[in-house]
Image: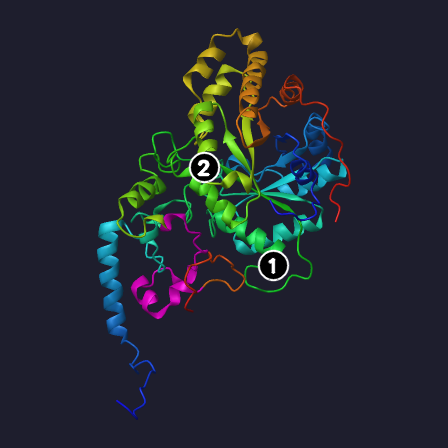
Amino acid sequence: MEGTTLDRRPPQTAPPSKGFRRALLLVERVTKEAVWDCRMCGQCILHSTGLSCPMRCPKNLRNGPCGGTLQNGNCEVVPEMKCVWVSAWEGSRRMPLWRDHILHVEPPVDWRLQGTSSWENLVTGRDRHVPSGWTGQRPGDPEPRA
Amino acid sequence: MTDRDPSSHLHRLLLAGEFVVTAEMQTSDSADPTHVTELAETLRGRVDAVNCTDNSAAHAHIAPMAAARLLLDQGVEPLMQLVCRDRNRLALQADLLGAAALGVRNVVCMTGDDVSTGDHPETKPIYDIDSVHLIRMARIMRDEGTYLSGRQLTDAPDYLIGAVENPFAPPLEFRPMRLGTKIEAGAEFIQTQICFNLEKMRLFMARCGELGLLDHVWVLAGVFVPNSAAGARYLRDQVPGVDVPDHVIERMEATPREDQKAEGVAIALEIVEAVRQIPGVSGIHLMTINHEEAIPRVVEGAGLLPRPPVSALGGA
């Protein structure tokens, strides 16, 4: 390889076609809605919340339960539903990986991503955009890519 | 618990190691400013700071910023509560800045009771950001001198940042860690949900101690003064997240109606005595429902009078 220069530029790929993106969105929606009752926020943190979708919380809480959890562990707003964060805590204890990610400070939701594919946003790094003034990084956390 | 030069009376007392007393003022539905000052009159000089609630129980009331300013005019230190239920991040930042400009030096950030519990259940709840975001946003404005967007403030606000935590609701094991998240976000003190269950309170505080949280936050234990057996039952059955043990209800029910108010004060005094013994508890936060006159009795009964004098309220 002596004398050659490696081309380290990312491969030039055509932007995914509209059809492909729609198919991806459909697959994500159908599978994640069926399995996790996903609300398609477009910035998935299921791995940090014990696989309990935080957007199912009527208050959309991303950083833990509110103070209104009933003594039986159910939601104050929907008393027949188990509190999303009680499920999240229990789920996080069963996770082989990322079990302590439930302690991370999650940044505010970017509501523009509602209804978009979190898989696409993960690949493009779009889901790691945070407001410029947000200083939510914990020491040791990877730098946001975007 | 930063070493900033405190501009808040409450902050100065906490730094001095004083066992502090705060209380929640009954909110006002009046456009007459004297109504707020009359409500606060029972608490003046009996507590160190007074919470101005933000549409409590999801019922519309006077704006906490306005109530806070009216208290300041009367020489009473306010704590302004802010909830995420009714405002998006723009409005919350506007209120944090505006309150600071009006002399408010303590804010308490929380999610808020859901609209379904209030008298406008058909309204659109906001929940743009959660309480941890609100705490961090208040901290960014104060310490970084910018809005959440990164845009520079002309002058940064100066306030002590508070939060709430409920040591009595599931998931109990997670609650101390959630307090850790709030501290990491920027909370400097917390007011707890109403404490009747001392066993849970002790476990919570012990766990917070193990996690090293108590060096970073002042904990004010929430204490409720029941005024009747019916009031205690209401709290247990209608207010989500409050743990009222059966023995408290039974004790109120066994008391003749005319003595129930005194019994409520006695119950509150026992809780105050007990929480004062718990390591890491820096003060109490007193709450009642239509029983404000009981608060001075509890403070006096607990031997916490006189309160340290207030100086330079709302100063820079």
Residue under the image location 27 percent in, 76 percent down: A17
Q: Observer-nearest residue: A105 or B107?
A: A105
Query: Mark on residue A6?
Result: none
Quadrant hosting residue B269: top right
Instruction: For marks 2 and 1, give the one nearer the viewer.
Output: 2
Q: Quadrant of the N terminus of chain A?
A: bottom left
Above or below, B196 relative to B208: above
Residue under the image location 29 percent in, 64 percent down: A119
Could you tell me residue B118's position as x and y percent?
48, 36
- In the rendered view, does B224 fall on the left or right side of B168? right
Above or below, B155 relative to B206: below
Q: Quadrant of the C terminus of chain A?
A: bottom left
- In the rendered view, does B56 fall on the left or right side of A55? right
Secondary structure beneath label 1: helix
Write the start and end of the magenta stretch as one range: A101-129
Determine if the magenta segment contains residue A107: yes
Q: Observer-nearest residue: B142 or B127?
A: B142
Q: CA distance from mark 2 to mark 1?
A: 31 Å
Identify the coloring: rainbow
Q: Earlier in the sequence, mark 2 or mark 1?
A: 1
Quadrant hosting residue A31: bottom left
Dot 2: chain letter = B
Query: Mark on residue B144?
Result: 1
Question: Which amino acid type corresponds to the residue marked 2 in the rendered image?
Answer: Glu
Could you tell me residue A7's position as x and y percent?
32, 86
Residue under the image location 33 percent in, 65 percent down: A122
Secondary structure beneath label 2: helix
Question: Which amino acid type corresponds to the residue marked 1 in the rendered image?
Answer: Glu
- Mark 2, residue position: B210
Above or below, B21 relative to B122: above
Q: Observer-nearest residue: B52 or B196?
A: B196
